[in-house]
Amino acid sequence: MSTPRTPAKPYEAGGEEKSEKYVPPENLRPEWNVALYTKPSESPAAVQERPEVRGAGSEMVDKTVELKKRDGSTVHLEGGLVTKISKGENSQEIEYQRGVDNNVKLDANGSPLIAKIKSNINGMESTIDLTAGTADGGMLNLANRMRVIQSGEKIGEVMIASQDGKHVSTMHSDFTNTTHEVVSVGGKDTPRLINVIKADGSTIEYTYNDNTKPTRPTQITERYNSAMGGMITQVSDRVGDSEKFVTHTAGSDKVTWRQNLKIEDNGRLAYQEIVTNFMEGPREYSNTDLTGAREEFIKVAASHGVFKGNENTIESWMNKFENRQKRFEDKGWKCASHDDIAESYRNLSRIFTDEPRGNAKRVTAGERRLAVETELMELGDPVKYINQG
């Protein structure tokens, strides 16, 4: 079993800059957060609403509010400002700069200036103190390149722009870190996603090699730890100028095809796997194939809402199924082989990825999800969940 990967540090804004080595910007881009994240149908106010400001600063009050977000995180607010974001064992606490009158200091755009961020991510604690003076004032000026989204769907996200304004790193409220870079498209600054670091340490990298379509990725590299402890790397290459990708898994001859690829706001990759209509001769599947089938099914099932998209719950039922087969094997009883288990996961994935034909078109997405949930429970604990009359 390989040593688990240490998750990359958050707040890396891209380029050669790291969170510990920020230097003062020569030309600040105070509106970078609005310019990068405003959708065509939205106004800047809809993207970055700020609490009402009265006088020279916003006064913090004792009232505390907790907001539950759809991604499972909790956002804590005091006096209308985000002071803590938490999800599971991960958390971030935010302190704001204050004046002698105890009012929160604001930047030129009326946004509250951050004083300190304390993070505890995957058991790793870190603190960024933006009030610590340096010879060149680097940490003090870093505060002008940081924003905490204070309202809307993105509330609780912490965003940091690089010195030249060409990269922006976002720590989402589910503790996924995304990095965008700004490129010129038709004379207009346009963001494109280049890197994703999830809370579990898995990563996604996007490569753009088509200069005629600079915001459309030509290659996607995914790296994540398997349930067996090994590292799995999958590389997806765009097929010509089409919307299809061919995916190769390192260390195996497994090849799959993807289409309808979509990159979500938090960097999550969604796609439909293309199932070929031909059969290949029988062959033995190795542990690597079982691992790949496990990981692929977890991703497909979660993306279709199985057990409310909770990957941990999905994996726990899979473990019960496999552990039951292992107990049978240890006792010398007839049991499912690695080949059988892998094929089971592939068939469960196809319930979502295959194109329905004939009467299958009448089966709704909710019915498919329920069928997969029921099957997993029956495989994991048949005595309890299979009605035997």
Image (spheres, grey):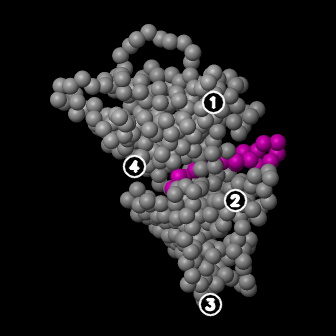
Residues under labels 1 and 3: Cα distance?
A: 66 Å
Residues under labels 3 and 4: Cα distance?
A: 43 Å
- Name the residue that disc number 4 marks: 6
| Image: 265 above or below 353 | below
Segment tinted magenta in the rendering: 175-191
- Name the residue that disc number 2 marks: 33
Residues under labels 4 and 2: Cα distance?
A: 29 Å
Amino acid type, label 2: Asn
Tell which circle, 3 or 4, labels the residue nearer the N-terminal end: 4
Res. 197 visible in picture? no
Circle number at residue 362: 1
Q: Position of residue 244 (x, y in %)?
A: 64, 26
Q: Position of residue 39 (x, y in %)?
A: 75, 52
Q: Nearer the viewer, mark 4 or mark 1?
A: 1
Residue 375 colored magenta? no
Residue projecting furthest to the front? 389
In front of the other: 23 or 377: 377
On the rendered image, what quadrant is the C terminus found in?
Answer: top left
